[in-house]
Each structure stands twice: as C-alpha cells, then as structure tokens.
Image (cartoon, rainbow, N blue to C red):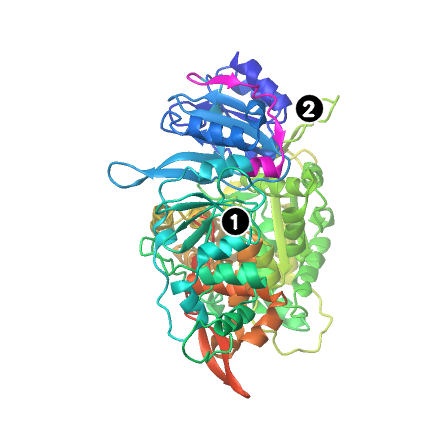
C-alpha cells in the first residue's frame, strides 16, 4: 500500500522519500539533493519495497507544495477553519486535510507562485511561560510525514492531487492563523527607543493618535482589548494586524504599504500612510501640526524609523575575524610546483604570485590524477579559484598550464566552459582525468542561481558528485530506450577558475554556502596588481617538462596504455605528518562544534571539509617535492594545515561580507560595503543615497534595518548652510546574522 501511494505521489510531481517514523526525517541519509530534483521511479520502488513510512518535501521541488501544521492535538484547528470559511466560503473544502500521528491536523495545498520557508504562525505561553507553537507552516526546504505512514490518515481530499490556490487565498489561510497568535515576541511589545526632545517623529511616537490615522486610511478595529486586532482595507472579516503598547504589528501579506511580520512605530505609520514613506516631508508636516519642541537640527528626522531597539534575548552576535589574505610564505611548495611558479612569474606581463601558485597547484593536481592517493584514499582532485581584478594577470597561468599539457601529449584532457552537467559527465566518460580552466566563474554561478530550468542546476549537482566520486565509480545516466551507459572509474576533475573578487562572492547564494560547493573550493585572493614587466618568449624549463612527461607516462596498476586500470600508488605519511594531520583535524573539530552550537550551517559545512583538504594538500606537497619516491613529511603536513586553516577563516570572513540569502539582505550588505570603503567609514545622506542607486523609500528602509541591528548609526554633520545627516559604520569588524538561521553576514 505504501509503495503504491509513494508512486502516485511521485507521478503527481511530489518529492516523496522513505522516512523514519519516530524521528520524523527521511531515511535516505543525505536528502538535501532531493530539495532540487525528484527521485526516479526506480529509486522510489527500491526504497518502498521495505519502507513503512513516507514523507513529502515541500517547496518548489514539489510544485510549491505547502503544509499548515496544527500541533497540540489540533487545538486551534476548528477556530482557524471557522475564520477561513467566514472569509472565503468553499476554500476550506478544496484543501487536503489529514490527521497526524498525535491527533493534530495537516492542511496541504500547492500555491500558484513561489512560497517562503517555514513560518511560525500562532503560539501561546506554556506553563513555564515559554512559547509553544500551535500553528506553523512547512514551506521551501521543509518536509512532513504523511499518510499512509502509521498513525496518519487523510480526512479530506487526496494527497496525490493537492489543490492549487492563488496568493490571495494563501493570504487568507495564513492571516487566519496569525490572528490566533497569543504569544508575541518581546520586542514586538517593547517601548520605543528613548526619544530625543524636539524631534517631531519622537513626539508623534509618544502622543500621536494612531487609531485615528489607521481609520482615516480604511483600517477598522476588529477586536478591542489590550492587544487590539485591526482589519486592513478591503477585508470584511478577520484581522490583519495588532496594536499593542503603540506598536503596530502587521501579519497580513496583502496590507500594502506594510510588510508582513513586521512591527511599525506610530511615526513610521504616519510617514508610510500620509507621505508615501518620505520621512523628511513627514517630519516637516508634523512640526507644522505642533509636534516637536526644539529645532530639527538634522534637517531630516531619521530618529523614529522603527519601534525596536536591540532584543536582550537575542543570541550573541558572532564576530568573524579577518585573518587577511594568504601569507606569501604559504604560497610556495618545493619541487615541481615552485618550478612552474618561477617560470610563470618570469614570463607574465604582470606577475601575480597568488595566481601563479594557483595555476601550478592545479597543474600538479591534474597530472597526478588517478595515479596517487594517501593512506586514507584521498585523491588529488581540487576545485581551485584565483581571485584578482581585471588585467591583473589571471590569463597567464592558464596559458602556461596549456603549454605544458600540450607539450606532454595530454591536450584532450583540457576543458573550458561548463555547458551542462551532462556535458561534464560525457567528457569525463571519455577522458576520466580532466582539467577545466575557466575565467569569470562567477558568471556560471549567477546562471545557476537565476536559471529556471534544470540545465544549470545539473552543473552544480555534477560538480558536487564528481568531487566525492574521485576514489570510487560514477554511474552514468541511463538514456531512454538504451542499455546502461556504464560508469566513470575514479573520475578526477580539476577546476582552475578565476574571477573578480566581489563578483564571485556576490554570485554565491546561501544554498551554495551550505550544499558543499563553497566548502570544496580553495579560494585564493590575488594582491594588488604588481608593476608590469616586458613579456618575453621563453622555452619551458627542461626540468618542468621532464617531470610533467613522467607524470603523463606514469601508469600505476595493471594493463597497458590502451587498457589501463588505475590502482593509484599510496603515498605514505611519516609519524610526524600523521601527528600534524590529527592535530589540524582536532582544531577544525573544535571550530565545527562552535558552529554547531550556534546552528551555523555555513560554518559546519566549511569546517567539516578542513581535514580532507589538509590531507589532499599534504599529498600534493609530497609529490611536488619528490615525484619518484614521495612521502608526506611533517613539513608537508604542517604547511597544509596552516594553509587550509588560514584559507578557511578567510573564506568565512569574505562570505560574511558579501553573501546574502535574499535580495533585501544583499542591499543591506551593499550599503555596509559602501560605508566600509568610505573614508572614516562614514558618508553624508545625499552621497550614500546616490551611490546606492535606489529610491529614497527603499534607502530609508535599509538604513532603518541596519540602525536597528546596530550596524549603522546616524550622526550630525555640518554642511554648507545647515547641519545635515550622515551614516557611520558602528564597527567595521562586526558580523551579524543576516536573516536565515545559521548564516552570518557582515
């Protein structure tokens, strides 16, 4: 029965996975990949030949599937259902409703447009005065157990045919749940920040008539009390916001100009409703009406954008220190890699040590692919990225690598662009060891982020899978009507990419930070462009060619050149090397546990790869130093440990400064960057507004958010003719959460 149901869910476009009933999670191990693509029918048939429980993934992978979950035995379900039926007769009867294992209710539907992540809709205080969630959603990135799992029963509709509702209908469902909330966050009902005498915004916060203002603009009081419920214009039943202690909290997503799940001060209400968000005009008009007692010394009243100060109950902010770019002494490895670096620097129009090192390291990793391993079966495959500004010498190391590879007869192993994931697979099927050298890799990442088809998404999936398959086999995809396509034996994919620093980090998304792609990269930043030198034509050094040719001809394992089956030679480690590797592993585990304790998914992802990277680079150091009889020495392991630990800290710091998990946070980070780059980390209002290139309303909202998060402060400056406002970075080295739990930004 469960196998039949699972197949029907899959055929309906729903992502179904086997589940562990008591733990309420998939039983397939790592299931994040299925948030992007559906499993095959063959996989589902295999899973459910033994599985006894199933779950459905919500979000875009299942056609914008969303669940409203009623906990505590469905305590609020009947009240919610009555509200929905009163506002939209017939809507409730279209939804899929099931009983959960503990007597709660699941309400299931698809939305015509994209949905957000999980939301807590209604809470109450338990006996210990702690918030207890009664209604919440499972949205993008979520999942839920469902019938016919033991204890789950469909009461209405068919899970294999969930209805599709529009945004207005979804708003009715969510707003009805929000209106049942009994437990507000402490900051929602906290007093205003301390007012400054003489500013009309602060004065209006203290004594302005909020109810009269709301009524003037079509809002109606739905329920009175200490916590008043208000109904937006155009709505005849239900509620859309609350008013308590002069804080207006909006929970409707259809109450423009207000945003859902946001609190507003009286002055903010006035500016948005009366003056379209122009705070300067709003302050001036309030002064005409008698608000404010002293002259407005700033010229623009920016004091009361928001209601809230810092929440004392928030978790401590996380500081990510900047270790600085990679020290020069770590950009050298004895032997072959240094020889290639020296030649690259001697012949480059603009010598760049970081890029020369990156290119030489990638070349060594490629030449040794499928031919050596360490005692833990780590291979030499690397994803390496050199960052430098335009015309700083990014192209020359690629040309050097190409010359060497052509000279030793391996030209067919070179690649350039990633057209598709299937194309990468096909290329490696023919040539299992390849090096792709590509410029402006940020363009590929932007395409993956913005693409609406599966082609670009498959590139990311292939790169992640190939990296992990270097010491195993990769099964090729089966094509319709054809026999099995075979496997790629120990694929060794080397990526040597280059990009402009800011473009690369801004092309990354929160998903890329946590799906393992970012953690697999070795990212090195080139310094400022060096003084130029007259380029010259020079033959490749004989020692470089001899070593490269030795690697090209080296065939560990049985068979001849045509039918060679690689059995990589194992490079042993000295006792000192083993001790150094264990030491670095333990250091990374300490950092991992710190990230785990704060639910920092980016930190756990990146620190979790440190030990593997140390082992790979120790191996590369050893074979560069002595390719014929290599051994991983303590010096190799110490270098690799210092290199990887420094690079990991730098990657996390740079990501915190540039990567945002949504467009609004990206704008916040961009404003912080403008201030960070300004003299004294401060800019006048007019100049910063011009540099942000956005309308004043959006600008004020962003400044308001950053001021509330205590990242930016507003100061008075003297301008010709009057005193004006400026914005200053509070702490240039401070990094705070940017919206998603666990993701830290600067």
Q: Is residue 236 above or below residue 321?
A: above
Between residues 680 and 402, which one lies in front from this camera angle?
A: 680
Between residues 681 and 217, which one lies in front from this camera angle?
A: 217
- Taking the magenta stretch, the answer to whether it contains residue 443 is no
In this picture, residue 256 sits left or right of residue 195: right
**Image label count:** 2
Residue at the image position 64 percent from the left and 22 percent from the top: 11
Tag 1 secondary structure? loop
Q: Which residues are magenta?
A: 150-171
Q: Residue furthest right?
A: 481
Residue 57 rendering spot, x and y as whole percentages: 53, 31
Whether residue 338 appears in this view of the structure is no
User: Of marks 2 and 1, which one's residue comes earlier in the chain?
Assistant: 1
Disc 1 marks which residue? 219
Residue 724 rendering spot, x and y as whole percentages: 51, 80
Residue 185 rendering spot, x and y as whole percentages: 36, 48
Disc 2 marks which residue? 484
Tag 2 secondary structure? loop
In the image, which is nearer the foreground, mark 2 or mark 1?
1
């Amino acid at each position: 029965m469960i196998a039949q149901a699972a197949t029907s869910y899959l055929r309906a476009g729903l992502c179904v996975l086997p589940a562990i009933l008591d733990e309420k999670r998939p039983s397939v191990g790592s299931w994040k990949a299925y948030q992007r693509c559906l499993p095959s029918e063959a996989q589902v048939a295999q899973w459910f030949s033994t599985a006894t429980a199933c779950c459905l993934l919500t979000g875009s992978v299942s056609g914008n599937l969303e669940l409203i979950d009623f906990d505590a035995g469905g305590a609020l379900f009947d009240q919610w259902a009555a509200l929905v039926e009163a506002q939209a007769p017939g809507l409730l009867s279209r939804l899929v409703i099931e009983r959960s294992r503990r007597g709660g209710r699941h309400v299931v539907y698809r939305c015509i447009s994209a949905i957000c992540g999980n939301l807590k809709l209604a809470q109450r205080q338990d006996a210990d005065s702690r918030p207890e969630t009664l209604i919440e959603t499972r949205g993008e990135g979520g999942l839920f157990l469902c019938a016919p799992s033991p204890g789950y029963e469909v009461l209405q509709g068919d899970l294999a045919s969930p209805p599709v509702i529009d945004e207005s209908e979804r708003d009715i469902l969510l707003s009805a749940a929000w209106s049942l909330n009994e437990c507000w966050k402490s900051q929602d009902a906290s007093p205003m920040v301390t007012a400054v005498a003489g500013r009309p915004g602060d004065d209006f916060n203290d004594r302005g008539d909020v109810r009269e203002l709301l009524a003037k603009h079509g809002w109606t009081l739905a329920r009175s009390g200490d916590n008043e419920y208000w109904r937006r214009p155009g709505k005849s039943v239900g509620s859309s916001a609350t008013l308590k202690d002069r804080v207006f909290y909006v929970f409707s997503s259809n109450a423009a100009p207000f945003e859902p799940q946001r609190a507003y001060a009286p002055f903010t209400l006035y500016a948005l409703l009366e003056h379209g968000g122009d705070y300067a005009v709003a302050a001036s008009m309030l002064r005409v009406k008698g608000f404010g007692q002293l002259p407005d010394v700033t010229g623009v009243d920016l004091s009361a954008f928001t209601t809230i100060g810092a929440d004392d109950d928030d978790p401590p902010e996380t500081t990510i220190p900047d270790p600085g770019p990679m020290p020069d002494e770590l950009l050298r490895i004895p032997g072959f890699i240094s020889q290639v670096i020296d030649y690259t620097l001697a012949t480059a129009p603009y010598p760049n040590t970081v890029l020369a090192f990156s290119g030489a390291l990638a070349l060594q990793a490629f030449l040794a692919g499928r031919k050596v391993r360490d005692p833990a079966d780590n291979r030499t495959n690397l994803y390496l990225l050199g960052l430098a500004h335009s015309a700083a010498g990014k192209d020359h190391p690629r040309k050097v690598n190409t010359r060497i590879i052509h000279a030793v007869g391996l030209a067919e192993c070179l690649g350039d662009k990633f057209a598709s994931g299937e194309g990468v697979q096909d290329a490696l099927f023919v040539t299992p060891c390849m090096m792709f050298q590509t410029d402006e890799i940020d363009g590929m990442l932007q395409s993956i982020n913005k693409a609406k088809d599966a082609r670009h998404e498959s590139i990311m999936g292939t790169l992640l899978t190939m990296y992990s398959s270097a010491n195993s086999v990769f099964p090729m995809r089966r094509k319709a009507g054809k026999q099995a396509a075979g496997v790629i034996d120990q694929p060794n994919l080397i990526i040597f990419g280059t990009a402009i620093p800011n473009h690369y980090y801004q092309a990354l998304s929160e998903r890329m930070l946590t799906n393992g792609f970012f953690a697999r990269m070795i990212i090195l930043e080139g310094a400022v462009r060096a003084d130029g030198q007259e380029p010259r034509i020079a033959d490749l050094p004989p020692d470089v060619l001899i070593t490269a040719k030795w690697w090209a001809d080296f065939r560990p394992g049985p068979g001849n050149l045509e039918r060679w089956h690689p059995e990589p030679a194992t490079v042993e480690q000295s006792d000192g090397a083993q001790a150094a590797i264990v030491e670095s592993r333990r250091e990374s585990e300490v950092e991992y546990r710190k990230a785990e304790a704060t639910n920092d998914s980016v930190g756990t992802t990146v620190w979790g790869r440190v030990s593997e990277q140390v082992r790979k680079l120790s191996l590369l150091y050893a074979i560069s130093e002595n390719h014929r009889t290599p051994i991983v020495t303590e010096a190799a392991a110490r270098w690799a440990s210092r290199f990887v630990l420094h690079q990991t800290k730098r990657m996390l710091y740079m990501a915190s400064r540039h990567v945002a998990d949504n467009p609004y946070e990206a704008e916040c980070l961009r404003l912080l960057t403008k201030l960070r780059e300004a003299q004294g980390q401060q800019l006048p209002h007019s100049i910063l507004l011009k540099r942000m290139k956005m309308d004043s309303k959006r600008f004020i909202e962003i400044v308001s958010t950053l001021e509330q998060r205590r990242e930016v402060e507003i100061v008075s400056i003297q301008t010709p003719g009057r005193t004006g406002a400026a914005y200053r970075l509070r702490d240039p080295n401070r990094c705070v959460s940017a919206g998603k739990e666990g993701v830290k930004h600067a």
